[in-house]
Image (spheres, rainbow, N blue to C red):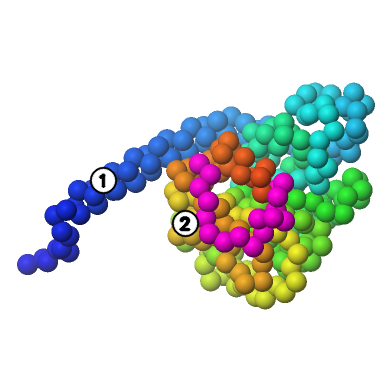
């Protein structure tokens, strides 16, 4: 005879209601993921071409040689934000940041750059070295000594490796990660045939390397993680847990992996993180933004 766990009668309806709520939220998140995927597939070809380096914006928008690009920029003197580098995830490209880029531009960020790395990239360390070269070029072109980075999924892991292991904390003021497998993800074992996927597995040499001490790391980390992210297994793997890093983990409720770079509530959270990383650094816990 199989013995079932005992639950008091008064708790059984509550447990059932909670399960229904979770199922309904998961269905809504899945439907949103499918809609976002369909839209992204339409935009994907537009992101295959590498973006031309943008000139340093002047104080007068009429002087900008690309007026179409400045249509959504504020005409007044906004805050002096450092350049923001947007780094996409695995087998993706810069088109994933169309909405986030527009949101940042409308709220005063004047220098935004999306970097494409090759889909044939087979090593996170190599990709991080290339990222470092791009950032040096951006700093030289803009005259700025620091940048901020927003990385989705694998992009966040590449950026973290650059910051933590290659001295990138000298250049990166704030690193925002969206659904990044900081502790590795156990999703889709069959996909481990790809070298980069193997590097993102729990217990890989690269994940172990990121657990090493990082004394004096100056970059502020903000990690957005979703309670319904089906790519992060377990979902908490998208949180940063390192004693030497100044990190804040922000919980996003009710959205999945693909929604993180496009959800308006997440975009608002990213803007807030970039504006006030110094004041929020070191804060622990989770904040719901959706």
Q: Where is residue 129? Give x, y as percent.
A: 77, 60
- The crowd level at tag 2 (other Cα within 10 Å; few <14, some 14-19, many 20+) is some
Q: Where is residue 88? Give x, y as percent.
A: 65, 46
What is the chief secondary structure element of the magenta stretch? loop
- The crowd level at tag 1 (other Cα within 10 Å; few <14, some 14-19, many 20+) is few
Specify the segment rendered in magenta.
274-290
Is residue 150 or residue 120 the one in the foreground? 150
Identify the mark at residue 17; answer none if there is no mark. 1
Tell me where residue 216 sits by quadrant.
bottom right
SS class of the residue under badge 2? Answer: helix
Residue lying at the far front in this picture: please name it: 279
Q: Where is residue 29? Give x, y as percent.
A: 43, 40
Tell me where residue 281 sits by quadrant.
bottom right
Of circles 1 and 2, which is in front?
A: 1
Q: What residue sits 48% from the left and 32% below the top?
A: 35
For the question of whether residue 24 can be seen, the reply is yes
Q: Are marks 1 and 2 in contact (CB under 8 Å)?
A: no
Q: What residue sits 66% from the left and 45% below the top?
A: 272
Is residue 230 or residue 64 the one in the foreground? 64
Q: Mark 2 sits on what residue?
A: 235
């Amino acid at each position: 005879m199989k013995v079932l766990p005992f639950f008091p009668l008064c708790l059984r309806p509550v447990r059932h209601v909670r399960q229904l709520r979770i199922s309904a939220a998961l269905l809504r998140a899945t439907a949103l993921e499918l809609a976002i995927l369909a839209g992204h597939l339409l935009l994907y070809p537009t992101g295959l071409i590498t973006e031309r380096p943008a000139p340093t914006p002047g104080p007068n928008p009429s002087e900008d040689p690309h007026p179409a690009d400045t249509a959504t920029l504020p005409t007044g003197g906004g805050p002096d934000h450092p350049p923001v580098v947007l780094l996409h995830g695995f087998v993706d490209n810069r088109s994933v940041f169309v909405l986030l880029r527009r949101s940042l531009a409308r709220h005063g960020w004047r220098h935004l750059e999306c970097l494409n790395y090759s889909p044939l990239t087979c090593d996170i360390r190599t990709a991080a070295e290339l990222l470092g070269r791009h950032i040096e070029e951006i700093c030289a072109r803009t005259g700025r000594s620091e940048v901020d980075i927003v990385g989705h999924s694998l992009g966040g892991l590449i950026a973290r490796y650059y910051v933590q292991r290659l001295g990138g904390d000298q250049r990166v003021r704030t690193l925002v990660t969206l659904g990044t497998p900081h502790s590795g993800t156990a999703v889709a074992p069959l996909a481990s045939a790809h070298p980069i996927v193997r590097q993102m597995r729990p217990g890989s040499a690269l994940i172990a390397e990121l657990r090493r001490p990082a004394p004096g790391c100056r970059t502020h980390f903000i990690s957005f993680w979703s309670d319904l992210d089906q790519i992060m297994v377990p979902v908490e793997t998208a949180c940063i847990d390192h004693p030497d890093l100044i990190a804040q983990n922000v919980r996003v409720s009710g959205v999945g992996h693909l929604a993180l770079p496009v959800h308006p509530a997440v975009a608002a959270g990213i803007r807030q993180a970039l504006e006030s990383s110094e004041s929020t650094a070191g804060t622990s816990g989770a904040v719901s933004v959706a």
